[in-house]
Amino acid sequence: MPTNAVVTDIKQVTIRFSGDSGDGMQLSGTLFSTLSAIFGNEIATFPDFPAEIRAPQGSLHGVSGFQVRIGAKDVYNSGDKTDVLVAMNPAALKVNASYLKKGSIVLFDTDSFQKKDLDKALFQTQDPFEELNLDHIQPVGVAITSMTKSSLEGSGLENKEMLRCKNMFALGIVCWLFNRPLEIADKLLEQKFAKRPKIVIANIKALTDGYNYGNNIHLTASTYRIEPVEATKGFYTDVNGNTATAYGLIAAAEKAGLQLFLGSYPITPATDILQELAKRKDFGVKALQMEDEIAGITSSIGAAFAGCLAATSTSGPGLALKSEALGLAVMTELPLVVIDVQRSGPSTGMPTKSEQTDLNQALYGRNGESPLVVMAAASPTDCFESAFTAAKIALEHMTPVILLSDGYIANGSSAWKIPELEDYPEINPPYVQNHFNAEAGEWKPYLRNDDTLVRYWGIPGTPNYMHRIGGLEKDLVTGVISSNPENHQRMINIRQQKIDNIARFIPEQQVLGDPDADTLIVGWGGTQGHLMETLLRLRDNGKKVAYTHFRHISPLPANSHELLQRYSKVIVAEQNNGQFADYLNGKYPDLNSICKYNKVEGQPFKVSEMVEAFTQMMEGK
Amino acid sequence: MPTNAVVTDIKQVTIRFSGDSGDGMQLSGTLFSTLSAIFGNEIATFPDFPAEIRAPQGSLHGVSGFQVRIGAKDVYNSGDKTDVLVAMNPAALKVNASYLKKGSIVLFDTDSFQKKDLDKALFQTQDPFEELNLDHIQPVGVAITSMTKSSLEGSGLENKEMLRCKNMFALGIVCWLFNRPLEIADKLLEQKFAKRPKIVIANIKALTDGYNYGNNIHLTASTYRIEPVEATKGFYTDVNGNTATAYGLIAAAEKAGLQLFLGSYPITPATDILQELAKRKDFGVKALQMEDEIAGITSSIGAAFAGCLAATSTSGPGLALKSEALGLAVMTELPLVVIDVQRSGPSTGMPTKSEQTDLNQALYGRNGESPLVVMAAASPTDCFESAFTAAKIALEHMTPVILLSDGYIANGSSAWKIPELEDYPEINPPYVQNHFNAEAGEWKPYLRNDDTLVRYWGIPGTPNYMHRIGGLEKDLVTGVISSNPENHQRMINIRQQKIDNIARFIPEQQVLGDPDADTLIVGWGGTQGHLMETLLRLRDNGKKVAYTHFRHISPLPANSHELLQRYSKVIVAEQNNGQFADYLNGKYPDLNSICKYNKVEGQPFKVSEMVEAFTQMMEGK
Amino acid sequence: MEATEIKYQKYLAKDYKSENAVRWCPGCGDYAILTCLHKALAELNVDPHNTAVISGIGCSSRLPYYMNTYGFHSIHGRAAAIATGVKVANPALSVWVATGDGDSLAIGGNHFIHAVRRNVDINIILFNNKIYGLTKGQYSPTSSRGFVSKSSPYGTVEDPFRPAELTFGARGTFFARAIDVDMKTQVEVMVEAARHKGASVVEVLQNCVIFNDGIHNKISDRTWKADNTITLRQGEKMLFGKENEKGLVLEGWNLKAVTIGEEGYSLDDVLVHDATTKDNTLHMKLALMDIADDLPVALGVIRSVDTPSYDSDYERQIAEVQQRTPKKSFTEFLLSSSNVWEVK
Amino acid sequence: MEATEIKYQKYLAKDYKSENAVRWCPGCGDYAILTCLHKALAELNVDPHNTAVISGIGCSSRLPYYMNTYGFHSIHGRAAAIATGVKVANPALSVWVATGDGDSLAIGGNHFIHAVRRNVDINIILFNNKIYGLTKGQYSPTSSRGFVSKSSPYGTVEDPFRPAELTFGARGTFFARAIDVDMKTQVEVMVEAARHKGASVVEVLQNCVIFNDGIHNKISDRTWKADNTITLRQGEKMLFGKENEKGLVLEGWNLKAVTIGEEGYSLDDVLVHDATTKDNTLHMKLALMDIADDLPVALGVIRSVDTPSYDSDYERQIAEVQQRTPKKSFTEFLLSSSNVWEVK
Ligand SMILES: Cc1ncc(C[n+]2csc(CCOP(=O)(O)OP(=O)(O)O)c2C)c(N)n1
Ligand SMILES: Cc1ncc(C[n+]2csc(CCOP(=O)(O)OP(=O)(O)O)c2C)c(N)n1
Ligand code: SF4
Ligand code: SF4
Ligand SMILES: [Mg+2]
Ligand SMILES: [Mg+2]
């Protein structure tokens, strides 16, 4: 524990570890967020990768960052700007300069701020701080590289291996700054490198020496203390959105008593879902890496036909490729969960950046009238709930469900209370042999439950229910292919009604904030953390304002229209050019109150910008 | 010329030739419409194919129809109901029974109305007319089969070949009924079977004998006379929508001085476009049948990059498969014409039936914000104009253009005044070497014309303009890949503005009907013929009503908003669940006047139904 | 084979027929293929409810409607991928794919080669009529160079795929060929295809009476069939001709058709068929024989090599992992993962 | 070849280098391939402005950015189809495809086999690192059975494609192989690929230092290279080993590696390489040689058969049609079609 340093108690703090792709910043960041969570803080993280290729060492393109926000409570997102920046080289400083708060600490490695390093980052002068006009910050130069090396002298490691521990030395300093006990970090390192004890020892050594260095010189900066908070009792882990999505599907399969099948094809930033599920053979999960996205979805459609909880995971360009097959799933009314972890488009766009521009594609990207369910997850941990719910709806209503996630929540993590499956609702698929109330011989594959309009599921292997399905239009009653005009109209209506009906089975839309506000902020998907904090700040500023966040997009919750009508101003904030806003306008033409707040930069929203913009909107521009 | 028959002068008449797929009804219908056009009538046709497989002979599923509407003027569509039905078998009668007008003539082949034929059509009794409650029509039984055989005795044809001439015997009777001179038909037959003189002679013989038979017995029905009208002077031919589309592209290529390239894959009802262009090697057209739709569009993107007028043709499921590559064309800003001949969906749906359900897919079916141009052709001949315009916009604005056609106009035909290309506008692509006003070395591939925001086209083979393009986001100025947040936002905006700008280059939206009406009927695409007639009928009924038909959907014509605002009631009629209506509501949220008229039956609109429905809507439900 | 274990109750061909009216053109070769599949299933005695027939789009792909089994008429080209999902999901099913030359070699080419490479235990019946039937007569990837069709009015300028060659190129372990009209051989090879573990490709030379009538006449017509085809049988001499008077011999790298007793060739020179060798050199030569080279077209099972199928290996791997790791509930699994802490 | 006719002005390798900074991982095999392509183009002396380099998505597919030619970095898997469009649109261009094992054999498998079958005159450089590099380490269709990767934590249960075998299965007329570090052979085969009319496939065994380091070591490492590889040259004996002391001979259907002077083998027994035979039996055997079978891995041009390319045949057909039919304007054409009438 630092003794003679100035210690400040604060509510929240944002730290960004930044360096070359090879500098191990993702590991420092992950360790720091995990140990903070274990220590009792709320956390939110934002790994910000460079484009997918390794760039030349020290270049601006090669900068890899990991941002962690920790706090006593109300940590809804990873933060706009940083209080502490760890900059392993000049490129890292340059790339992050505009995100530094006033007075923030910049911890940098003096060994890698030499002329040649500055050149690589295209600095013109020898003083990067001045060149960037950073006069409002506290630079803390530490010879991280050389100290790490001397720390590990005699460790038996090769030079290259020693250098890889720089990130731990830096982390040690940060731990000192934030008063984190090192034991947790030590244990995490032991787990991580379980098979390479030499590496464990070296990492712990570098970490400890970094910590001690901070302690010894107690730098020139103030240190922070963030107190652990009281959270609900129970066991916790931290989880990112992709892992949580994978877990949600596993949980739903377990709950439904079905085997989980995933047909997929790697694509940033969705690949982790495939990778996580490929590991889960212990749960009997069948996760197939197929030859492309079309085979990913069609193998899943085959598995759905054969009686699995079937899913497919992808990102925008992959969803485009799945369009035709999605129509088949709509037409055959098979249960299928399609996960789209959105990234910046159009086309290949910016694969490692996040946005919300696939909503239209999810709603409309198919030929013909082909309605399906669209949902969006709100946060890393909400990915679990959303994936579970998506699976439940797919199975119980015999329909494809598209679940939108995004790169920001997919890679970002939060602390997560480990769920007890007993607390989750049952999942009851409409198996024909259990739910159809007549002789097997009378059954036809498109007969429906009168109430829900859901057809029954006859799974291959079940005696007496052999049948044929397909992509052609079929007779309402007999299920035989038909091109009768009136029948087609009826089937078009029924398929739509079946989806609309689902509104009865999802929760009503809730509103946060002031009950008597005139202005409603509307969000959907992975922006919840930022909108939540924006709400709090606006209210701190004395504004009356309400906020609602949509998880269910098609169908919309039953009370949506009535709810939106209550406000004279509805601000729809999204990371696209207004897709949800237009959708609402199309659904509710009498609604003339929508203002759009759109930002498509491939970066998370900034709370400060939103507070300003919304305030102006509320004041009537 | 019939002498002692009752001759009625009428304005319009609708005739349907109907029989087995093998009965040659498409040929009878085509000949009849062509010779009527040549005779000087206006025509509109509607070939109504069975599902794509040949069904058992005489069965209900195997019925193939060809409907022709002819008239002195105002023939806007192929008609709701028929005045004359030629029914070659009982199945044809049954399938068309509900489309018979009161008092219409049913010409049927008594030879094929025997017990076994009735059975095949699932009649229960021996009297099909009674069974169908057809007491309001004039049945005309003729032993077509046996008379055709005796007509051709000694012709040297085999029995099977003789039977194939039944359709000409029937056509002969119809020609007599409508007072069509046989010489034109004779000449058409000579052209059609140029290489098989025996067949020509037999067909002409059967035709003449049918005609004479009609004359001789002068049946019991009244005959019709439709007078030729005064049309604009010039040369005419008849053309269906698919052929007109192919021709529009050829004309545009000729006008632009570019080679035409089509990468495509067969799919109903778009295949004819590929087939027509594959024939046109005389124009140097390169029409490639690729391995799938994705290769169809991507080979075309390659050809566009290499400097062709590039196009790809498909129907809904194929457009779905092209989604990802369309995004690439948006991102690389290459000129590309994508033709979607819509058919009934979702999924495989009803491949031979027509509807307008791909609008959403055309507008939104891609990942990311990826705006492009969407147009829709209004009629068979308008396919020519629309394809020409689509090509012009694509080439001059460096953008993909989706042109929506549909099965109804694609297969239907009208008389078409052969165009003189001099009357068509120039096409001037922004070739970099002609349009960029600086040194070649200063050029970057995404530099733009300040006014139009169009980038310049540097075609491989051009010295000094080597460059690289791709699907990744790129810097606004240098064109080098970039993931800078502000740059991305700017590029997103520019791509949208570039498309919005095109509104300045397209004609303003025109309104027909009453200038001071309160109600505006809005249509788009292939329903123009039916809406036009609906307008006339409503006005005949004394209603004040206006009508506008959209060819340009994205961007909308510049005056659209202002125009729509003028009316207190806007009826948007479309063959889907309201896609254009929702799009307008999203674009113009202040518009609260839209009523939807939607019909998704896979069949053309019915004028009579619309007159009734619109009248109710105008009377405030 | 899980799906075909011997049952005491016996099925007849008619038990596999559905109530749907068959709707191909009169005279279409597809009828015979359908009948043969009914017969083959009866011979295999597999439960109709444990059978799944998957197809894409095309005339050929209508087949599932006419089967009293579980059936899926899907979208163009994707049957092999869907069937992969069905089989991996439930390896106990007998899974068949009905597909056309366009469906599986044009748009579906990628799924075809990958299903073959993975060796998924599915039986692919490839209806090769060398034409797109359903869309009314465009050339297909198996149409010969120069073929005139609606989409190649001046003749094609590309060589066709030869299905056997592509199958072998994708490491295929089973390939057989039959002619639509030769129902005996067809049933035989279908039965063998089902018995083979892994991806089985059965090419049926099928006549499209409407758009490509007679394309296989040179080998299917009685007049020439005996001389222009050879039906290969495991362990038997490669003999053909009306009286089995001809045989295949090896000459250097090449196959040669000879008449026994002529040019000094005796029965001993004639090759014996072995479909089971891992090396596919001879299988390839047999499969590519062509009357243009004075060689008969090979029918019957040309190659059949047993190697573990993808689906069975997948099951095995799951079983191994589950044996190694004690069974846990989902919550237990989460609790046992790293980075867990307790808030008390 | 239209695109490479001899010019008097000479280009140097650097003339094909773009100004963009190269961004592969330090040590990646892709650098060498890029350098070789620069050199090969210089040797071919083709104008940079008449050269188009098309790629899909993957680390390998970044290559066009580093070429001072026309370049197109497209979408995953579609490079072969795009290149087909480019070449058919303008046959005068020298068209290259840069692609990875995932790009062209997983998602792009169908376009790959169809471009090969059609024999479009494009040169496909297939960077085979047996991994998905760009997405950070999943197995690819060329990864060996049992390969452990992020997406196959327990090892794969599928056999890989062997690019040569698939190419031949699709009727490929040109196949060559090189190792990234062996720049001399690489430049040679690239030049040959460009000179070959039709689709040329060049497989480069490429090292991904980050996700699959050393995967080709057994053959690329100096220690073993001489014994574990053989570089085939047209018309030359198939010799290998440090001192060329070993050779390939035929034993029945099979190839065998022998030491000259041992076991009674003399230089005369050693096969002479002929890449130009239409029959690909021996090419296939050469291409599939594997050190696991005690045979060296074949490098160099394994097969190169000249047959008319799709694009040249397409041009020829257009020329023929245009010669037959007198040139008409579009309006003249319409007027001369059937069903024309005049309203006066
Ligand atoms: C995505 C898509 N593209 C194209 C089509 C049109 N289509 C239907 S079947 C077919 C080809 C049929 O040929 P083949 O597979 O050989 O079957 P066959 O009819 O000859 O049995 C085509 C191109 C379609 N239904 N879907
Ligand atoms: C449609 C689509 N699917 C998936 C991806 C993700 N992706 C990019 S490259 C790649 C595979 C790269 O492997 P390979 O082609 O072998 O190239 P390498 O990086 O190894 O050179 C994948 C799966 C994508 N960009 N687009
Ligand atoms: S079109 Fe050809 S393949 Fe199709 S059903 Fe008719 S005969 Fe058979
Ligand atoms: S990840 Fe592998 S293939 Fe990609 S650039 Fe790095 S070393 Fe090369
Ligand atoms: Mg076919
Ligand atoms: Mg690779």
Image (spheres, coloured by chain):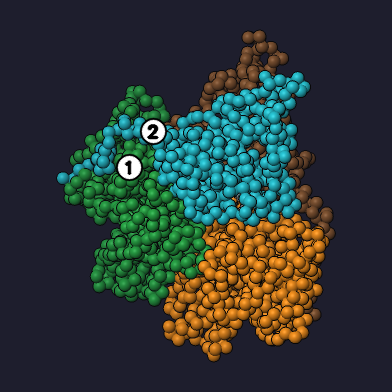
Chain colours: A green, B orange, C cyan, D brown
User: What is the x, y in percent for residue A247?
Assistant: 32, 46
Please give left or right for residue B219 compared with residue A137 in the image: right
At x 49% / y 72%, what residue is drawn? B599
User: What is the x, y in percent for residue C34?
Assistant: 55, 46
The N terminus of chain B, quarter of image: bottom right
In this view, the residue in front, B374 or A155, is B374
Examine the rendered structure and indicate whether residue B39 appears above or below residue D12. Answer: below
User: What is the x, y in percent for residue C272?
Assistant: 62, 24
The chain ID associated with circle 2 is: C
Q: Which residue is mark 2?
A: C317
Label 2 CA crowd tier, 10 Å (few <14, some 14–19, many 20+): some
In this view, the residue in front, A96 or C2, is C2
Q: Is residue C329 visible?
A: yes
At x 79% / y 68%, what residue is drawn? B205
Mark 2 belongs to which amino acid?
Gln
Q: Which residue is mark 1?
A: A30
Mark 1 belongs to which amino acid?
Thr
* Secondary structure at numbered mark 2: helix
